[in-house]
Image: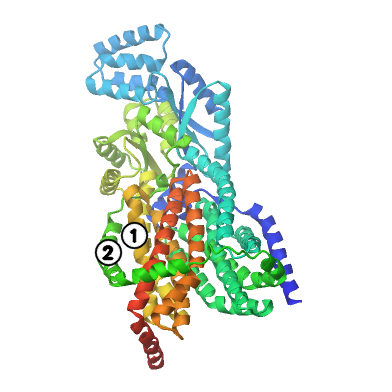
Amino acid sequence: MKQKVVLIIFFLLVIISGVLITQVEVNYDLEKYLPKDSEIKESINIYKDNFGDSSYAYIAIDEENVSKAINVKEKIELIEGVKQVLFVDDYLNELTYSIIRSYMPVETQSILDNTLASLLATGITYPEALYQLANYLPETQKEELQNQFTDSVSDSHMLFQVVFSTSSADLKTEESVDSVKILLDEENYDYKMKGDAISTAFTKNTIAKETTLITLIIIPLIIAILIIMSKSFFDIILFGIVAGSAIIINLGTNAFLPDISYITQSMAIALQLAISLDYIIFTINSYHGFREQGIEVAESVVLATKKSRRPVIASALTTGVSFLALAIMKFQIGLDIGIVFSKAILISLFTTLFLLPVLIRLFAGLIGKTKKKSKITDFTWFAKFGEKCSKYRYYFLGFLLIIITPLIYLQTQNEFTFGVNSFSASEGTAYYEDSNWIDENFGQKNNYIILVEKNNSLEAALYQKLINLDYVYNVDAGVYYKSVITDPLVLSSVIGSFYSDDYALFQVTVMSDVESETTFAQYEEMLNIVETTGFTENHIIGETAVSYHIKDIIVRDFTWVLVVAIIAIMIIIFFSFKNLLIPILLIVVIEVAVFLSMSIINVFDQDLVFLAYLIVSTILLGATIDYAILFTKRYMEERLEKGKTESIMKASIDATPSIVTSALLFIIAGLTIAMISSINSIAQIGLLIAVGAFVSMIFVLIILPQMLYIFDKFIIKSGLWQIIIIIIL
């Protein structure tokens, strides 16, 4: 009766969760995770409150005729959701000419008027006429005008900057982008696009396709591993039922959260599958062990559940607290990842402890009938190999001691990217190629928005300071137009977008990338200029500003997350083993493995995404410590009756199949994500996980046994000291 209740409960949970999956909201706006009390978050909110939401796209079309391009621009402006389209005619027009003309002597004005009229009479557009007229101007003005022309016009392409009235994560923006694409397709244009509106849409569509593709690829690969490593063919069916139930329940219960990040969504199935199978493998292998001893099914299930309960719970707790440690991050994507994956661990634990034993009892006959005769899962040979390595055990200890300091130093030498730009598409994707093409042909542009209180004299002073910076390409501000436009009606129509009731807006364009040490230094200089000009309130926003603040936030997060995770894991291991030395030993072995993994990756990839590095460091610590716990648990059980050499041999034979299987699943999950994902940060997370799982497996199976042997005497004694300390406390 009890078994039927368990089956009914899980059946209902799976059905309900399957329906709820369609209700899960996915968030693609990483700025949402900035701390609410952070300076940059406040600045973004003030901008949105005063000037509205917006997003942008740079669009290059294969058009050689400026007049036709202006016609396309006008059609794009009619699309719903398009706020503004900036093209060369917005910079080189009658207003621009009148401003230039006003600075010239009367005689020169007459010459320029006649020359301009002659140029326009040939049928060219006003921007083209001004471009040619620039040859008659002083060198500084000539260069400025011609640069403004070539920023939008090349021999074969025209570049528009399209501003949308909604944020990049808003569905309406994606609909507007789609409408622009339809228009350009109808006009038979070949086009290239970049910008936050485009990258967000690319990310949405890519995640949706690639999550399905990753799942379709990873499942057959995992089945192949399980066929090789499992002791019964029917075990694979049990793996599928239990792990599948856990994954569906976890995905469905995400509907009770406000939303989850696209990073979490993209990794959810693959990582939970790799993690949850650990617990199932431990329990099923334990069941097979008792059955091979001739024990009846019912008793074998009870004994296997009892035997595996403590290491499985300890394993789940260590992995769970590692994810929960991410929740203390001020950059709140850590909370998002922490909640979803901690929940995944808890659900996987419950399905293993309650659903799996029922299924084993129910299908015991089929498990027995499909039992394999192959000895491929017999790792006695590996245990013997480990025994041969024992003569080098003190070399391994020396290796650990020597390598720790250099590895810690190498972590400080990694080249990281921090901001939203670091989550862009990977090399080889259409978005990446289009973005690079636009940068190479029209120049790399980095835009800032500066908000200050309205004050004409201070605005003028700020404008002069900014425009004189050698790396600033252009400054667009209302105070400039106030100084050159005398007609009140014209002035009012021009400066309306630069002012709200309380703030004046400066648009600053810098010809640089979004994120580098040089760019950050430029940002700091501009920030200092704004703050020292005399305004009582000022704000700077833009991709560089966001990246700068994210860097400041998550670098501090990393230390706290790592410390909290290590302490929490050590406490769990301490109470699991009732021993003082084992937690220290296991953490050292695994942390060295993790640091080594990160250093290996850094040799091949100089631009690590820091958030990926932080997340993976925590995931690997929590997930691969399971291997060390399982091995040490078997060693300590055998050590009660056997010597240390024999105990290590037996622990290797018993634990290696589960550890190797688990590590292979993690490696497959990580490599699949790395190879399939077009999102740079997600691909890096997958690669880091795969390398980390492999290195950790080697450390646990080769180095850990030698450390247990060397410190065996102290491990035994530290158990007694633990009892004394508890009594004293």
* Along the line of sight, the residue nearer the viewer: 448 or 197: 197
Q: Which mark is residue 596?
A: 1
Does 237 sit above or below residue 635?
above
- Disc 2 marks which amino acid? Ile
* Along the line of sight, the residue nearer the viewer: 243 or 28: 243
Residue 503 in sight in this render: yes
Give residue 229's position: percent from left, percent from top: 55, 61
- Disc 1 marks which amino acid? Leu
Q: How is the image coloured?
A: rainbow
Name the N-terminal-most of marks 1 and 2. Answer: 2
Q: Residue at x 34, y 60 (%)?
A: 596
Q: Residue at x 58, y 36 (%)?
A: 175
Q: Which mark is residue 403?
A: 2
Q: Residue at x 53, y 60 (%)?
A: 274
Identify the element where label 2 is drawn: helix
The quarter of the image holding the N terminus is: bottom right
Give residue 75's position: percent from left, percent from top: 54, 24
Does 655 sit above or below residue 169?
below
Q: CA distance from mark 1 to mark 2?
A: 9 Å
Residue 507 in sight in this render: no
Identify the element where label 1 is drawn: helix
Give residue 417's position: percent from left, percent from top: 36, 49
